[in-house]
Image: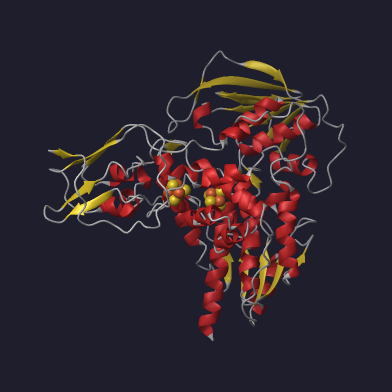
Amino acid sequence: MTTTFNPTKISKNHSEAPEVPTLGSELLIEVLTDRCAGCQECLIRCPTGAIGLDTDNWIVTVDSALCVGCGQCERTCPFSAITIDGTPKVAPSERHYLQNRAIPAIAPWEETRSGFSNLEAVLAEASRCLSCPDPTCVRGCPAHNDIPAMIASIREGNLDQARSIFEATTHLGSICSRVCNQAVQCEGACSWKLAGNEPVAIGLLERFVFDNSEIHAPHIEASSSMKVAVVGSGPAGMSAAWEFVEAGAEVTVYEADPIPGGLLNHGIPEFTLPSEKVSEVWKSLSDAGVKVELNHRVSQDDLQDFTEKLDAIVLANGASSPIRPSVQGLDRPNVIDAMAFLAAYGEKLGAHNDTNAIEGKKILVIGAGNTAMDVGRIAIRFGAIPTCVEWVTESFARVRSDELEEARHEGVSVRFNTTATLITDGKATLVTTQQSDPKVLPKLIPGTEEIVDADIVVLALGYRLGSEFGQLAPQAPFRASESTKPDDNWITSGIFSGNHNYNRSIADLSWKREVAVAAARSPYAANVFVVGDALVGPSSVVEAMASGREAARASIRAHASKK
Ligand code: SF4
Ligand code: SF4
């Protein structure tokens, strides 16, 4: 037996629910009443009040007129008692005008990805958000930013309030909105995406808010006797410093580079993340009293001294040891790692080499992730001829699709299913690979060898913890792989049934991020915390930021409880 509409006997109060978009064809939502157990999982997740409960028969009822077809109910019903047919009533995404923009023919040094500049488009995009009662987007965001509340403030035209809402959980909104891979974070978990539609452009909305509202200084709540050291000034260190200074602590940050920002400076080029976005956060921190010791690489003696004298130490050193593939010839002098290349030519550290040094050179980049794209795009800007090779199949590669598109448009040759097997003087041997299952390593196809010119070879396969950190903190935990699987709460929330990226469900990815961030709350020694990539290996900027935040908050709580 099925029902398409019954009078609702009990329904939620949706007086504040967003206006239902009127687009899309008629939807047919049906409850298979012989399957419905009246558990109301769907009722509490429906964002529009389309579902009610018939208390006489203890089954849910639906109002097709209110249904927008987001699919939360169909996805979360444990008994598969709801079906939806028809096109969802979702307004078209406003990000299309950015996606269709002309990419400049000559690769510029200035930021290449534009954000919304038109308030009408911003408001139209914000109106697509359903203010879901179970906002899966928040769980997809490693920082757990309150996305629906931020978007509601945009709809009210209150950008300052929107910024404040995000600042409860992030100090790096203008940075994360530019460098997060939203497809596997907030936007990948948006209800619209989970229902197979274009997600709300959360990253672009966040960027608009942070670029168009006044920068807030740290809000120092009280003075404290706490004295702390933060080692590393990347996203994890910045976030920890912000939390500590807001708690009234005396904070000193130690940075080995000549400018603060860590990976945000030497790992991300200007055309992806303008340096002013990093320096404005540091200015706020400095104005609030955070001291920064630049060109200071913390030694074991320093750490011993800090441990004896300070209330807390946060080690946010990052992961800096390049992953080296098993390719013959990697010890040749023309082989360098991506971070060295970016530091030399990426401009932000202001110390790049002779700009003519690589003009006309053939550069072979091993890897085709975001860092490899950065290397290739910088090489293009210096007149070099870069080729990135990646042995996995393109659809399984860990690269932002817009980053790949831009790199190719600028002239970077990106070859998937290709790997290098031998590096000699000025040459490399490439081989074609085959991979149809992302869980199975690619196979080399015999007889496909080709020899190509390779004046410089750049390793861009990612980073792991360096031995330097092991010497500094030999007892530090390292939690590179968490095998914990999502529990039932995550599955019934609907997030588990999200589309797959990198052949991993959004739930699986976000659960691992959750476990990694939570791990940062436990000190490894009495007053020493390890955070970010130093704790879990290479992660994203927002994960590192959340990790630094959690360690600082845990440390502040522990200090307060001693009083
Ligand atoms: S911090 Fe990143 S994941 Fe979180 S809402 Fe912003 S763009 Fe999305
Ligand atoms: S952004 Fe998407 S998941 Fe989040 S509240 Fe809005 S519609 Fe729901």
Quarter of the figure with residue 5: top left
Q: How is the image coloured?
A: secondary structure
Q: Is residue 466 visible?
A: no
User: Does 398 appear above or below 46?
Assistant: above
Is residue 395 found left or right of 268 in the rendered image? left
For this rendering, which residue is in front, 162 or 505? 162
Q: Position of residue 255 (x, y in %)?
A: 73, 60
Query: To which quarter of the image does residue 353 belong?
Result: top right
Q: Quadrant of the N terminus?
A: top left
Task: Spot the residue most to the bottom.
Answer: 563
Q: Nearer the viewer, residue 185 or 387?
A: 185
x, y percentage for residue 506?
A: 43, 44
The percent position of residue 544, horizontal first and vertical second, equals 58, 55
Q: Is residue 273 above or below residue 281?
A: above
Q: What residue is shown at x 78% (from left), y 61% (from top)?
A: 294
Nearer to the camera, 416 or 192: 192
Q: Disc count in the image?
A: 0
